[in-house]
Each structure stands twice: as structure tokens, then as C-alpha cells.
Image: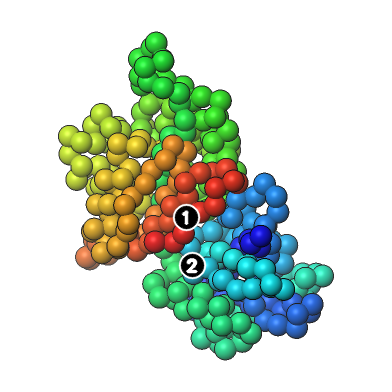
Amino acid sequence: MTIHAAGVALWRRTPAGELEVAVVHRPRYDDWSLPKGKSDNGETVPETAYRETVEETGYRPVLGRRLPSAHYSVEGRAKVVDYFSARVAGGSFLANEEVDRLRWLSPAKAAKAVTHRHDRAVLAELTAVPVDLTTVLLVRHAKAGKRDEWPGEDDLRPLSPAGLRQAAGLRRLLPLFGADRVHSAPLVRCADTVRGVAEDLDTQPIAEPLLSERHYWDSPSAGVARLLEIAAAGGTPVVSSQGGVIPDLVTRLADLGGVELPAVQAKKGSLWVLSLTPADNGRSGAAPRLVAADYYPSPLPAPRPSGKY
């Protein structure tokens, strides 16, 4: 049976704006590595990465784009470690049973300090694009039963029991990526999928008609422009939309950004973590540009992320 684990390339900026990455010393192995650890039962991969980072370093991470996974053997068993870029949001280091020392180093010095080759591959990918990216959390609404079995107006169709479980999973998952505001196509099932996240932020979902199936196809370019406008406002927005919109929207963003993607999926309750360059509000006025897109087919722990694209 494969051992599953998750970790982060934890980074911060110095007061002078220099990039630093955390490397940790594990006395059990006498090695220097990136923070990581094994998954507990019932955890999603992002939950493992977040928990292990807090336990090993004392710092609270904000997860971002996926980085290369490590594959190796431990005592004859296959092990997979999924990594994320992660910005420090707070906390401080305190030595513990797993980690007795932590060093903040430039990426180049960190690559020399770590013991394992796979950690160097993670660090190389971390710095392959700017780390200061904007994240958009694009959600397809959770399960809402069958349209032909709902007697009322389709826009009012509510979440099913399975959909409520997916919404609860998203309520746990999205804050790990720093969700700070919520947008939604104006359908009950779309808004209710992310309402719990909005409640935790003490806000309400902002209605986005251009990102609903009813209006998106009147002008897909207007829908893309609206998504980029949401991204340009900064922070980490959650956007809840529909299965008839998301594949085309993500594909168009990828084409604009020059990002190669396989066939874009959008299962009910799924999540796309879209990493975009921040808006350039200076003379050029450049819009955000997609640089990476990671797909999570479910917010629940059983299905694992399908990988980094």
C-alpha cells in the first residue's frame, strides 16, 4: 500500500523584499528537508500539508499552486509526497519532537542545504515563476439532484444531501488557500455551495450573472473579462459557477496565458485553483495572466488531487 504524505515550500519576503524559504532539520533522520508529513485518515491532501506545516514549523501557511510530487520507496513501500507553494501567514518556530531547527534561506542556498534531490526539484519549480501570485478558487456547484425531479424553477433547485456534504468539505478546504471573499453565479445551488465559506468570512456571496450558464454564452469574452476583473482586485476570491461555464472559462484563460492543459474537467463540487500574475496597475495596465491551474475533483478526502497541470 502506498504511503501518502504532503508538504510545502514555505516562503516569505524579508523587509527588503528578498525571497526566503524554510528548511527544517529532523533529528530522527539527521537531514534537512522541506516541511512534510504523512496523511491522517479522513484528510484531503491540502489539509495534510497545512497541518504538517503548523506541527513542524509553528507557521500558518496559505497554500498556493501545486509543485512537483516526490515518489520514492520507504522500507519497500512506495511513498508519494504532494507539495504546495505556501506563503507564511503568521506564527513562529518552536523546536519540537519532529523538527529541532529551522532556517530561512534564499532559494539557492536552500537548494544546497536540503539533503534530498526531490526537495531540490520542488524548490526549482517554486522559483520557475514568480511566487507572488494571485489565487482564484473556481468551484463548480455541489450536487443538487436531478433537474427533472425538481418541481420548481431550476434556478431555485437546492443542494442534495450529497451536495451538502460537498459544501461542508469546501468550507474546510477553501480557507487553506486563503479564501477572503466569495462570488457566485446567481443560482441557489451555486450560492449555497459556498455560503458556509461566506458565513465564516462574515459576508455574503456577490452575484455574478456573467459567470452563469444563462449569460456566459451571450459573450464568453465578457465572462473571462469579469473573472480577470475579480482576480485583479487582489486577495483570494472564491467563484462558484456551473459545469456549462467552467471548462470553457478555464480553457480560455489557459490559452491567454499560454498554459497547456489536458481536457478540462468540472465535476460537481470540484475546485480549480487558478494561479495568476497580479494585475499591473501601473502604466501598462496589464490584466492578470494564468500561469498554473490545479484541479481537485472533490473536496472530500477519498478522491486525491489528480495532479498539477
Q: Amino acid at mark 2?
A: Leu
Q: Which corner quadrant of the image does residue 46 belong to? A: bottom right
- Residue drawn 55% across the image and 71% down it: 70
SS state under label 2: strand
SS state under label 1: loop
Q: Determine which of the numbered discs, if any, sits on residue 67 in the image.
A: 2
- Residue drawn 34% across the image and 63% down it: 291
Q: Which corner quadrant of the image does residue 186 belong to? A: top left
Q: Amino acid at mark 1?
A: Ser
Between residues 81 and 140, which one lies in front from this camera angle?
81
The colour scheme applied to this rendered structure is: rainbow
In this rendering, does residue 303 appear at all? yes
Vertically, is 195 above or below 77? above
Pinpoint residue 43: horizontal percent, then vertical percent. Answer: 65, 50
Vertically, is 23 above or below 148? below
Pinpoint residue 216: horizontal percent, then vertical percent. Answer: 24, 36
- Residue drawn 38% across the image and 12% down it: 152
Q: Earlier in the sequence, mark 1 or mark 2?
A: 2
Between residues 257 and 284, which one lies in front from this camera angle?
257
Pinpoint residue 269: horizontal percent, then vertical percent. Answer: 47, 38
Vertically, is 270 above or below 291? above
Direction from residue 32 to residue 272 in the image, left or right? left
- Mark 1 surroundings: few (<14), some (14-19) or many (≥20) residues within 10 A: few
Quadrant occupied by the C terminus: bottom left
Whole-angstrom CA distance, mark 1 to mark 2, is 13 Å
Quadrant occupied by the N terminus: bottom right
Between residues 77 and 103, which one lies in front from this camera angle?
77
Identify residue for label 1.
306
Direction from residue 96 to residue 303 in the image, left or right? left
Nearest-to-viewer mark from 1 and 2? 1
